[in-house]
């Protein structure tokens, strides 16, 4: 835990604020690149749409699986910052290499390297955040980090949109420019973020082997509930497709997605602060209900005007669950020498669930209509809510032992 008397930056400790800046800058860089990779592959390198899907599926699976191993390695080594720096550095170096890609398989290799970076850094980063905050502020800290991350993605999209016409839609030059933000992200991380290692072993104490029983039954219940919840969520691309279906003009689709991103970013810190006051579990469950209600609205609306409000509500759900879910992991896994392992499992299970969830959602949409698909997502949200309702733990008691 960081010193309670440490000078605050906008109300956050130096570690929390600095890692928020890192997330912001890295996502500025990422969205400048990855939003345009499908177009670059198909129009410049001549790849098929199937190959584009292969690249993205392979990349996401790589990152999800690596999170488990990286989290466990971080706990065994007792190192957080070094692995986070390595992961962000790997992703930073990978992006400008796209500028010299001459074949689709080159892009596959670059995406693989980038996702190795993501898979390596995420669990140690979340463990470092959870150890860098005073008792009672962990929800706010994760809210700040996730809000900064999403805001960076929004800014990256806007920058790319404005810059591309000025460089005659030269994607290769855009990829080179993206390196600037990611390089600054690594610099901030190296200079301003301090290591907060897990508790050292006491004399005679042995390493804790990786077994679910050491993580505790409450964590397993949460992992099951959050994985089922993730199975009901889908790629934002399908949500945008629904907006198009109700009559939102093509040129406004990026703007309606921007509404979701901005609401998510703006409300992440307030939602995190609220969770510290009323309980992380309670806030997360409110987010689950908002999610299911939003999907029901997506299934029933036919108004191109009303759907803008639904997208805003969808941003509220994200703000109430994304960072708060990470705070719950810290609540439930009391042994900090297992914290990164727990974060790796949480991120991997929920990340891997998105692929089958999206496939099922798309199949239901094609076979039975979009209403059925959205009701499927809403139903899984309710099922996850019911499972999570059985999880009981005293957050105030846990916090005293954790921080």
Image (cartoon, rainbow, N blue to C red):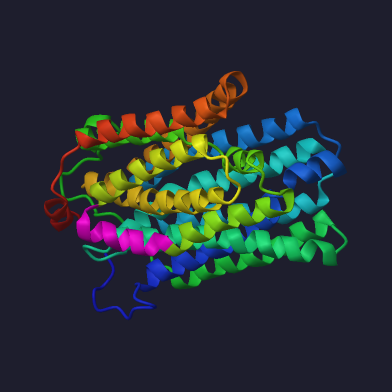
Quadrant for residue 26, please give it: bottom right
Per the image, is 82 magenta?
no
Image point (39%, 29%), residue name: 379
Residue 382 seen from this side: yes
Residue 143, percent from left and from top = 38, 59
Q: Is residue 191 above or below residue 396?
A: below
Left or right: 381 as drawn, with respect to 211: right
The segment highlighted magenta reads 267-279
Residue 82, percent from left and from top = 46, 57
The foreground one among 280 and 19 is 280
Which quadrant does the N terminus fall into?
bottom left
Q: Is residue 53 above or below residue 117?
A: above
Left or right: 54 as drawn, with respect to 325: right
Left or right: 75 as drawn, with respect to 22: left
Image point (73%, 48%), residue name: 250
Quadrant for residue 224, please give it: top left
């Amino acid at each position: 835990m960081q010193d309670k008397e440490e000078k605050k930056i906008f109300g956050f400790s130096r570690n929390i604020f600095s890692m928020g800046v890192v997330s912001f800058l890295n996502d500025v860089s990422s969205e400048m690149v990855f939003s345009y990779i499908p177009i670059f592959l198909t129009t410049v390198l001549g790849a098929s749409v199937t190959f584009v899907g292969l690249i993205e599926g392979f990349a996401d699976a790589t990152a999800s699986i690596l999170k488990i191993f990286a989290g466990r390695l971080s706990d065994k080594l007792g190192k957080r910052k070094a692995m986070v720096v390595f992961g962000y550095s790997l992703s930073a170096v990978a992006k400008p290499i796209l500028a010299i890609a001459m074949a689709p398989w080159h892009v596959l290799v670059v995406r693989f390297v980038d996702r190795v970076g993501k898979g390596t850094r995420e669990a140690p980063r979340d463990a470092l955040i959870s150890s860098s905050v005073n008792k009672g502020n962990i929800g706010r800290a994760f809210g700040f980090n996730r809000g900064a991350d999403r805001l960076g993605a929004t800014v990256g999209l806007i920058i790319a949109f404005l810059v591309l016409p000025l460089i005659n839609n030269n994607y290769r030059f855009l990829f080179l420019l993206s390196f600037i933000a990611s390089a600054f992200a690594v610099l901030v991380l190296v200079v301003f973020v301090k290591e907060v290692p897990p508790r050292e072993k006491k004399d005679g104490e042995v390493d804790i082997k990786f077994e679910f029983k050491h993580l505790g039954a409450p964590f397993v219940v949460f992992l099951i509930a959050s994985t089922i919840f993730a199975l009901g969520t889908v790629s934002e691309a399908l949500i945008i497709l629904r907006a198009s279906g109700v009559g939102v003009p093509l040129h406004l689709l990026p703007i309606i997605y921007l509404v979701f991103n901005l609401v998510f970013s703006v409300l992440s810190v307030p939602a995190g602060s609220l969770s510290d006051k009323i309980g992380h579990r309670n806030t997360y469950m409110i987010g689950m209900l908002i999610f299911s209600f939003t999907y029901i609205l997506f299934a029933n609306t036919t108004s191109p005007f009303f759907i803008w409000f639904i997208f805003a509500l969808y941003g509220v759900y994200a703000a109430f669950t994304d960072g708060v879910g990470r705070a719950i992991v810290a609540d439930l896994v009391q042994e900090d020498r297992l914290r990164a392992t727990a974060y790796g499992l949480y991120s991997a299970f929920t990340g891997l669930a998105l692929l089958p969830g999206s496939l099922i959602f798309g199949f239901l949409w094609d076979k039975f209509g979009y209403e059925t698909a959205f009701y499927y997502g809403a139903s899984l949200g309710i099922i996850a809510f019911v499972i999570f309702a059985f999880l009981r733990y005293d957050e105030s008691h846990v916090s005293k032992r954790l921080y």
